Image: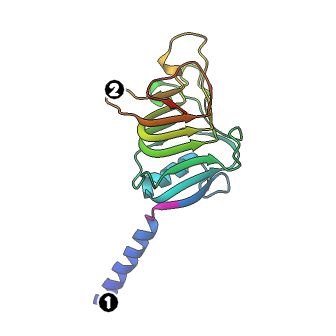
Amino acid sequence: MKKQFLFSVLILTFFSFQSKAQLSGTYTIGPSGNHTSFTAAVSALTTSGISGPVVFNITPGTYNEQITIPSITGSSSTNTITFQSANGDSSSVILNYSPTSTTNNFTVKINAGTYITFNKITIKSSGSSFASVIEMSGTNISLTNNIIIGKQNGGLSSNYLEGIVAGGINIVIINIFVCFSILFFVFFSYYIYYC
C-alpha cells in the first residue's frame, strides 16, 4: 500500500510538471503549426510562462482575431517574446480585428506585458466607428518593421480611431519603440519613441 501510494505521487508529480512546462525556443503560428492562432499562442504563454527567449514565426495568411497579452511569467531582458512573419514579409501576415465598442476597441492589447516584440507583420483594425489598432501598457515593447493600419477619420476628432494608444491614467510606459513601421492613420498618442 505504501509503495503504491509513493508510485502514484511520483506519477502525478511527473505529469504535473509535464503539463506546465514553460515555453522556450521557436514555435510556429499557422494552420499546421504548433499553435493555429495568435490566441492559442498567447494562451500557451499565459498558462505556461517562459523559461527562455520565445519566437513565434507566423505563416503567411490573415488572422481575424483579437489578442490581449498580460504579464507573462518569466519574461525578462533575456527571456523575450517575439511575434514575427515566418518569411520576413510584413505584408504576408495580417492580424485583423473589427472592434464594435469601447470595451473591445483594439486588435492587440498589451496589458502589463514586458519584453514583447512584433516584427514584420501587418496589424490592422477594420472597425467603422471603433478602430484603434494597438493599446499598450507595459515596458520594453518593440514594434519593428510592421504595417499598422487603422481607420482614417477624415479629420474628425475621435478617441475611438487611435492607431497606437500608449499610456493613460496611472499607467507607466517605458521603452516603447516603433522602428521603420508604416503607419496608416491620423492619430498618435504620446510616450512613443521613434528610431
* Residue 14's disc number: none
Q: Is residue 19 above or below residue 190?
A: below
Three-letter amino acid code at the position of disc 1 = Lys
Quadrant (top left/top right/bottom left/bottom right) for the N terminus: bottom left
The disc, 1 or 2, on the residue closer to the chain's N-terminal end is: 1
Q: Position of residue 102 (x, y in %)?
A: 46, 24
- The residues colored magenta run 20-24
Element class at badge 1? helix
Is 96 drawn above or below residue 71 in the view shown? above
Q: Residue at x 41, y 69 (%)?
A: 17
> Quadrant of the rendered structure where residue 154 is?
top right
Instruction: Say which amino acid is labelled 2.
Output: Ile
Circle number at residue 3: 1
Residue underneath mark 2: 169
Mark 1 or 2: in front is: 2
Residue 1 appears in the picture as rendered: no
**Residue 33 versus residue 77: which sits nearer the camera?**
77
Q: What residue lies at 50% left-to-right and 20% top-to-bottom?
A: 160
- Answer whether residue 13 is magenta in the image: no
Quarter of the image that includes the C terminus: top right
| Left or right position of 5 against 19 | left
**Number of callouts in the render?**
2
